[in-house]
Image (spheres, rainbow, N blue to C red):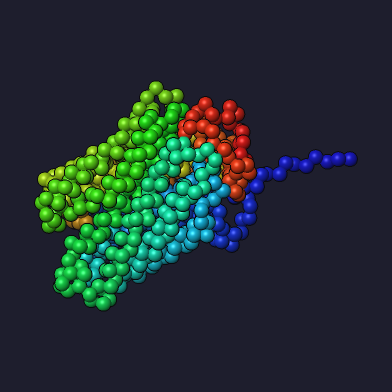
Amino acid sequence: MSTATAPQPQSNYLNEESSLRSWLLTTDHKRIAILYTLSITFFFLLGGIFALLIRIELLSPNGMWVSDETYNKLFSMHGIIMVWFFLVPSIPTTLGNFLIPLMIGAKDVAFPKLNLLSWYLFMAGGIFTVYAIIAGGVDTGWTFYTPLSTGYVNGHVITAATGIFIAGFGTILTGLNFIVTIHRMRAPGMTWSRLPLFIWSNYATSIILVLATPVLAITLLLVAVERFAHVGIFDPALGGDPVLFQHLFWFYSHPAVYIMILPGMGVVSELISAFSKKRVFGYGYVAASSIAIAVFGFLVWAHHMFVAGISVYAAMVFSLLSYMVSVPSAIKVFNWTATLYKGAIAYKTPLFYAIGFIGLFTWGGMTGLFLASLGMDVHVHDTYFVIAHFHYIMVGGMVMAYLGGLHYWWPKISGRMYPEAWGRIAALIIFVGFNLTFFPQFILGYLGMPRRYHTYPPQFQFWHVLSSAGASILGIGYLLPLCYLLWSIKHGEVAGPNPWGSTGLEWRTSSPPPTHNFNKLPVVTWEAYDYSSVPKNREEAPYA
């Protein structure tokens, strides 16, 4: 008598071997992406706690909850954690690590062991920085400006800087890995003109990572040398020049803004195309604009220094260049809008995040033009106007893109769908909460409220209370996806290979993908975003 056997689940990267050792020693780019996701989620929550304490303190104009020194440490550690351990690595190390080999038809990145090493370096740097927090914190701000960083009374600033120094080598390895992977491991037929725009954005980002990050590493090393060996580099008391530090720091840190935002732009390009069912309008120009942003990013650093004593002529040149960098960004926004025009729009959660990104990024970019203007910058420099502008780009833009991408590729990552209604609610809450939090800060800055102060004139209290109330709404919005995405891992509807009807290679393999991504060698015969090439049956996975 024969007995029927139940079909065995297809082997994938999640059910291969689930021991802790197998995860910690994995060289699978998908598992490493999950490790990075867990890590940056921890740092995001830690940085969020510091932000919560800051907003509570600013409810009162008298600074009655913490001391001056403690408040300095709060905003410093919030910035250090959020910039270096969340914003910079967020999309490249998570979605980028997971998707780049899948999108180009490769079985893994070019250097899998270096990929794992980059995560260990990132975690080692994070441990140093968290230790600096536990040991007493840092009060120099996230920029480590000298002579504060060279004359600070305890050694925690060097501990935190060491953490960033170590983590920086992880980002260099990631950028190198992506460049080689994209150049050398594309599937047959995957020409440069057929690359998804997400790949173009991460390629441009990787170039910045490899070229700019060593400058930051050298700068932090010089701070340590001056501190311990008393060599006059930046400290004027030793014959150094503190403006030199600003030049070196911003030569990295303004390109770092594009490290944070360029991958988000790539995500939004994918979302706009997928949910309008159209090829991205002006595909070639959008791809070229990513490279243009990377190039211009190296030419505008001194607009952070208009009040630092640089030459008026130099300031005028950097002002002009700062206006010019907005052109390739504007190309993307106009082309996304043109793609949506007369498209077959599907109002799914990822599109809500993409539209939110366009609105917040556009507003943040337009306010950046105020800071590129010499006269206006003198008025609003080091005020809450700068804080609002930065957060509209980085938090309003990058985090919206990250969450949009996470929702879009969640079925591919987990094999499960999330509750759509909760996804839309969370996106709307985040959009409303963000604007309530940071738009009042533009008004505060224009009225003259300096940043990094926790005592202020009583007439500013209304705007601070409004901003803190918005922050509480924003916090709820950020916690919702964490809850329902975790819930969906066990209880969500099983996703097919291509639940959105999208065009990329990643949607032509199973969900979750096999350990080596493709059981058959993909051969690309269609153009990027050609929706006529999508298999009619969304359950088909021709390369699984």
x, y percentage for residue 324?
23, 41
* Image quarter in which the N terminus is found: top right
* Foreground residue among 446 and 86: 86
Residue 103 in view of the camera: yes
Q: Residue furthest bottom?
A: 229
From this view, report whether residue 165 is shown above or below residue 411.
Answer: below
Residue 424 in view of the camera: no
Q: In the rendered picture of this protein, how many numbered marks are placed on residues?
A: 0
x, y percentage for residue 185?
52, 47
Q: Residue at x 49, y 49 (%)?
A: 184
From this view, report whether residue 524 is shown above or below residue 379.
Answer: above
* Foreground residue among 210 and 216: 210
Q: Residue at x 42, y 39 (%)?
A: 197
Q: Residue furthest top?
A: 342
* Image quarter in which the C terminus is found: top right
Q: Residue at x 42, y 24 (%)?
A: 343
x, y percentage for residue 232?
20, 73
The quadrant in which residue 140 appears is bottom left
* Horizontal side of residue 374 vs 158, given as left or right: left
Q: Residue at x 56, y 61 (%)?
A: 25
* Foreground residue among 512 and 102: 102
The quadrant in which residue 77 appears is bottom left
* Horizontal side of residue 416 vs 224, given as left or right: right
* Foreground residue among 50 and 279: 279
* Horizontal side of residue 157 vs 369, given as left or right: right
x, y percentage for residue 164?
36, 62
From this view, report whether residue 335 is shown above or below residue 171.
Answer: above
